[in-house]
Image (cartoon, rainbow, N blue to C red):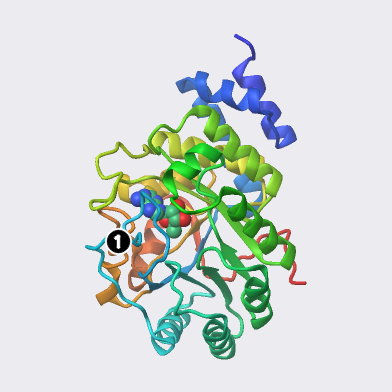
Amino acid sequence: MLYDLKNLIDKLYQESYLNFQEITFLLENLDEENKKYLFQKSYSRRLENYGNTVFLRGLVEISSYCKMDCNYCGIRRSNRNAQRYRLTPEEILECCLKGYHLGFRTFVLQGGEDLWFTDEKLISIIAKIRENCPDAAITLSLGERTAESYQKLYRAGADRYLLRHETADENLYHSLHPGMNFHHRRECLRNLKEIGFQTGAGFLIGLPGQKVQDYAKDLLFLKELNPHMVGVGPFIPQKNTPLKDEMGGDVETTLIMLALVRLLLPHVLLPATTALGTIDPQGREKGFRAGANVIMPNLSPFENRAKYALYDGKKFQNDEAAEELQKIKENIAAAGFLAVMERGDNISWKRK
Ligand code: 5AD
């Protein structure tokens, strides 16, 4: 044994850092006993920084049109079978208002890269949400845009931006994202941070050919970027995509990654993703115990939810539906956590 696993986990807890060799060693050798110890440590770190709270965000999926062609994604451009829809600015505002009345104080506007949403349109949508929901945070998740565009959206009043880096291995990235550029995506993330957004990066788990070394790169990229939010979830194969027959990610690996992200970035806002809740009915609760502290119930109009099909079996009912707020809160409480509707900013962020 090159390292003692327990010592490595203690070091990670104390220093919020492990190097490439240490992370790969940990991932290759983690046994049941040390896995438990890892979760114990990541759970303590979560409690120290955010107590037992879980922040709720209202998710509005604004468009299933996308000009990109990511091999794993159900709304990729080449998927002729994808059902396309686009919410009007009025519908987007209505969703936010509905969420606002339910008590949500963060709205996440997510969509494919849809050219209809020009800066002007988005600025006017953001302004309307700002006006009607003055104390709510506005999060955007609309893919790669220019630095100038991000700057305008920030000035218009958006607070946060989610853009997963998807994978930190350049070859794997290029094999999955035809026509996209690995360096450009990272550049976007640096621009978002520089502008002042609470910035979210993140990666997929269980991609075809993904190795322990790739996860180590993902984790170290996150450590270096130091984002305010991180989204990690299992890849789930989607019919009508080139990866339809692949395996997909598993719960255990996802939980280990959540734990490592929590320990590397102690203040991070870390969702227990819908994808995790999709592959395991208890996935979200397991996620909270591994260090996750956010969930994003769906506020999109009912008739569109099934159409935003990034992957097969995607949940949008019951615990994933914002209308079931009471049930969601009860389930969170039953797992020993406290659902919180406040904005829930990253504790080390201030608007500039
Ligand atoms: N399985 C899991 N997650 C997916 N995403 C896209 N397609 C899939 C899939 N098949 C994720 C991507 C993207 C986020 C919005 O959804 O990581 O960044």
Residue 206 vertical placement versus 230 (above, below)? above
Helix, strand or loop at label 1? It is loop
Give coordinates of residue 71: x percent, y percent: 36, 49
Mark 1 Cβ and ligand 1 under 8 Å apart? no
Give the image quarter of residue 7.
top right
Q: Residue at x 31, y 59 (%)?
A: 78
- Determine which residue is flagged by label 1: 309
The answer to which of 306 and 342 lies nearer the viewer is 306
Q: Would residue 164 be found to the left or right of residue 45 on screen?
A: left
Residue 170 shows in this picture: yes
Badge 1 amino acid:
Ala
Q: Residue at x 48, y 79 (%)?
A: 117
Split into 4 quadrants, where in the image is the N terminus?
top right
Q: Residue drawn at (23%, 51%), measured in percent from left and top?
A: 239
| Horizontal relation, residue 314 to residue 16: left or right | left
Task: Decide: is 260 above or below 319.
Answer: above
Image coordinates of residue 215 in percent, x first then y, are 53, 34
- Residue 161 x %, y %: 58, 65
The residue positioned 45% from the left and 33% from the top of the image is 210
In front here: 25 or 286?
A: 25
**Can the viewer see residue 269 in this picture?**
no
Dot 1: within a 10 Å radius of its alpha carbon, few (fewer than 14), some, or many (20 or more) residues?
many
* Quadrant in which residue 254 is drawn: top left
172 lies above or below 121: above
Q: How many circles with numbers are drawn on the protein? A: 1
Q: Residue furthest right?
A: 352
Q: Residue furthest front?
A: 179
**Percent from the top left, x then y, of residue 211?**
47, 29
On the image, which quarter does residue 74 sit in? Answer: bottom left
Q: Quadrant of the C terminus?
A: bottom right
In the rendered view, would you say 288 is above or below 12? Answer: below
